[in-house]
Image (cartoon, rainbow, N blue to C red):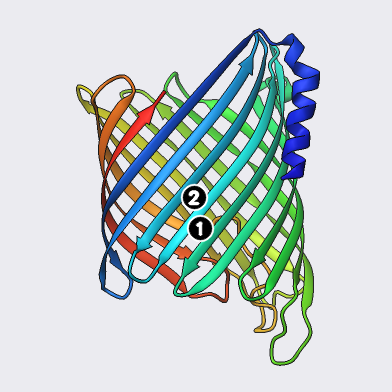
Amino acid sequence: MRIISFSIFVFLILVMPAFVYAQLEWDLNIDSGYLLLNNNETSYGAGIDGDVKYKIKSDNRLAVFNVRAKPEIYDIDEKLLSLKFKASADYYQYNNNLSWAVKVDYSKFSYNLKGNDHYNSSVFLLGEINSDMLLGIESFVRAGYSSRSVESGFDLTMDLVFTDLMFFHRINSDLKLGYGFYLEKFIANNEFTYNYQPGISSKGLRYGPQVSFQMNSEYILRGNYNFLIHDSEETTTFSFEQQMNLVFGKNIFENTFLMLYLTYYDANLKYDAVASSLYFQSNYENTVYLKLSYDLSDITEIYLKPGYRRIKLTQLSDSFSEWHFLVGVGITK
């Protein structure tokens, strides 16, 4: 958290004098409804998602400070709940053929599932350059560092550095395709003991292709897919991970919108039993849901949100899943 505070201070000192316009934005979503848990029991759940952004910008520069908090209750009787907190500071510099950005992110997720407390925190630093000059096509290159930790009856820590390169081709005025490559080097440490053996650590690489697409016409369709080979000191055979995100949106009637969200992560990691929890992903939740919303005014909407969610915190932990049907209200200003 001190890194975030220091970064915000540096941004304010160095770039504030050059900016000419500031804007505060916020949105709040409150929903509740019925859940069908993975033990086939029904429950009542509720959640609040609050997001505040402060933007400072001029013609070619933008700084964004963002704080978001999201408490959720999955089962009141069993006290299944989570609290997600995230704070970030981003700075963007725009030019004709070249733009760049620096981003700092801190997050802390707390879960209480089946009587077990689980805490995850991470610090994320990223530098990004976007250009039309590399090979004459739109592209970006990113490089960054992340530090993660998990407390869940045992302590896991991981440090990683990464870089990725993407190229984009505009097929027509509505469709843009992207392709590239991702490379990551990580060091993972596990402080707990297994069968009376001391804690262990491992170094490894994650690398592989990534593709994306964006379509904007009468509807919005955006997605990306990563296939990452996972190679470390502790993997016994070929291991890999898959990540996919998809968003679809369409205005179906006046003031009525239909959205589909999908987030998918799957790991096929061949560790031996001692090292099976060494690597832990940043995305714990596989989700898919529809959101049917109706605008009551320029700033207020009501919505229905049926969907499915599966949470798996580490390779060793049990998974938690639920189907839900939620009713909510959103306010944006």
Instruction: Return the x and y of residue 37 as percentages of the image width and height.
Output: 31, 68
Q: Position of residue 228 (x, y in %)?
A: 62, 56
The image quadrant of residue 144 is top right
Specify whether 133 is left or right of 294: right
Specify which label sits upstream in the sequence, 1 or 2. 2
Residue type at mark 2? Answer: Met
Q: Amino acid at mark 1?
A: Tyr
Please give the residue where the numbered disc 2 appears in the rendered image.
244
Give the position of the N terminus as an image quadrant: top right
Which residue extends farthest left?
Answer: 253
- Give the residue number, with chain letter if any, for mark 1: 265
Residue nearer the viewer, 278 or 245: 278
- Image quadrant occupied by the C terminus: top left
How packed mark 2 is, by other alpha carbons closer than 10 Å (few <14, some 14-19, many 20 or more), is some
Q: Position of residue 117 (x, y in %)?
A: 54, 69
> Is residue 265 or residue 23 the one in the foreground?
23
